[in-house]
Image: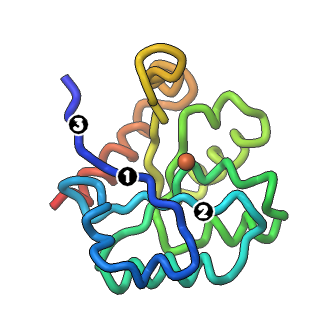
Amino acid sequence: MQNIFLGAEVAIEKGLSDTPDIEKLAIQGTDLILLELPYAPYQEWMEEEIDNIAITYRLTPVIAHVHRYLNWYNREQTAHLLQLDAVLQINIEAFQSFSQKRIAKEVIKRELPFLFGSDCHNLTDRKPNFEILQKKVRPEIIEKSNRLLECHMQ
Ligand SMILES: [Fe+2]
């Protein structure tokens, strides 16, 4: 039996941090807010928005599917992305892509804060895929993600 908590994936836009009541979009029962960066080259205002949300609303930003921005980011920008003051979210699909797997493995190896996600949308073509994760990473790595989530439960 899995617990289900309501959450949202919030697209980062200029001025988002000035929007009132953002904390209502945090993952239920936690101080975590899942933020999706634009699929566009990295720009400094994105980090400002992330930091402002963290400070103003006392939330911990989680960067959604941190491995999916590679097409838009150069090497430097990717390095910067991993250094944001945020939890990095890794979808299990990353382990099925040669280039995205590299980012996922780097996050794990460098012991950066991370959370795994299935990106499940339904029970047919985008169903939960945790069995893939269990084949790709050691149990203690999955446990790390679980522990981090527990640490952010209020
Ligand atoms: Fe997304």
Identify the image quadrant of the N terminus: top left
Identify the image quadrant of the C terminus: bottom left
The residue identified by callout 1 is: 8
Lateral position of residue 49 relative to residue 67, left or right: left
Label 1 element class: loop
Quarter of the view holding residue 102: top right
The residue identified by callout 2 is: 37
Contact between marks 2 and 3 (CB within 8 A): the answer is no
Q: Amino acid at mark 2?
A: Leu
Residue 43 lies, with reference to residue 39, above or below; the image says below
Lateral position of residue 1 relative to residue 128, left or right: left
Q: Residues within 10 Å of mark 2 (few under 14, many from 20)?
A: many
How far from the left and from the top, in percent, is residue 66? 60, 53
Q: For the point 64% across and 45% down, which residue is it?
A: 105
How far from the left and from the top, in percent, is residue 94? 64, 37
Q: For the point 64% across and 32% down, which residue is it?
A: 95
How far from the left and from the top, in percent, is residue 57? 30, 79
Q: For the point 31% across and 79% down, which residue is it?
A: 20
Q: Amino acid at mark 3?
A: Ile
The residue identified by callout 3 is: 4
> Is residue 141 or residue 127 the one in the foreground?
127
Q: Residue furthest top?
A: 124
Q: Marks 2 and 3, how far apart in space?
A: 24 Å
Sequence order check, earlier mark of 2 and 3: 3
Q: Marks 1 and 2, how far apart in space?
A: 14 Å
Residue 25 lies, with reference to residue 55, above or below; the image says above
Q: Amino acid at mark 1?
A: Ala
Lateral position of residue 85 relative to residue 40, left or right: left
Q: For the point 54% across and 17% down, which residue is it?
A: 125
Sequence order check, earlier mark of 1 and 2: 1
